[in-house]
Amino acid sequence: MKTIALIAHDGKKAEMVGFVKDHIEYLRKAKLVATGTTGSYIQQTGLAVELKLSGPKGGDAQIAALAAEGKIDGIIFFRDPLGKHPHEPDIQMLMRICDLYNVPLATNPGTGSLIIEGLLDDNL
């Protein structure tokens, strides 16, 4: 079973929930991991989600560690590119880990769909 991590900044959480609903049949086939607040929203869709800390409290770093350990197959991170984030170093570290360990990382719905379909479509 593939493991997908889901992260969304505050201004993107509603977009993430909509994205999850649009891809729910695919996501039922995956183990889902998410930062705390994002994951609590996603759980409302009925999907099981392993919750990590919220992003500002270390959740981004926890997911980066899982990626470095080879325990994450893809990450969907809806970032707010215009907002200021006190945990920006953790965000940059997560992106660097994805590049270093060749973990697919989507930062918008278009690439998120490609990752989900590429990892979870049984017909590919």
Image: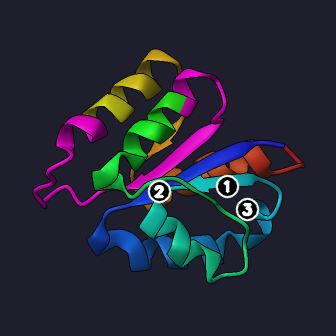
Q: Would you name the residue on which mark 1 appears?
A: 32
Quadrant in which the N terminus is drawn: top right
For the magenta stretch, what is the residue range? Answer: 66-91
- The residue that appears at 52% across and 77% down in the rendered structure is 41
Q: Is residue 45 left or right of residue 18?
A: right
- For badge 3, the amino acid type reads Leu
Could you tell me which secondary element the residue under label 2 belongs to? loop
Q: Is residue 86 magenta?
A: yes
Q: Kindly check if marks 1 and 3 are in contact, taking CB atoms under 8 A apart as contact.
A: yes
Rendered position, 61 above or below 44: above
User: Mark 1 to mark 3: distance in Å?
Assistant: 8 Å
Q: Would you name the residue on which mark 2 appears?
A: 35
Q: Would you name the residue on which mark 3 appears?
A: 27
User: Mark 2 to mark 1: distance in Å?
Assistant: 10 Å
Could you tell me which secondary element the residue under label 1 belongs to? strand
- For badge 1, the amino acid type reads Leu
Rendered position, 45 above or below 100: below
Could you tell me which secondary element the residue under label 3 belongs to? helix
Rendered position, 93 above or below 123: above
Q: Is residue 28 magenta?
A: no
* Residue 103, visible in the rendered structure: no
User: Mark 2 to mark 3: distance in Å?
Assistant: 16 Å
Query: In the picture, residue 47 is in which quadrant?
Result: bottom right
Residue 111's spot in the image, x, y percent?
A: 49, 50
Query: In the picture, residue 124 is in which quadrant?
Result: top right
- The residue that appears at 34% across and 70% down in the rendered structure is 12
Rendered position, 24 above or below 111: below
Residue 75's spot in the image, x, y percent?
A: 53, 44
- For badge 2, the amino acid type reads Thr
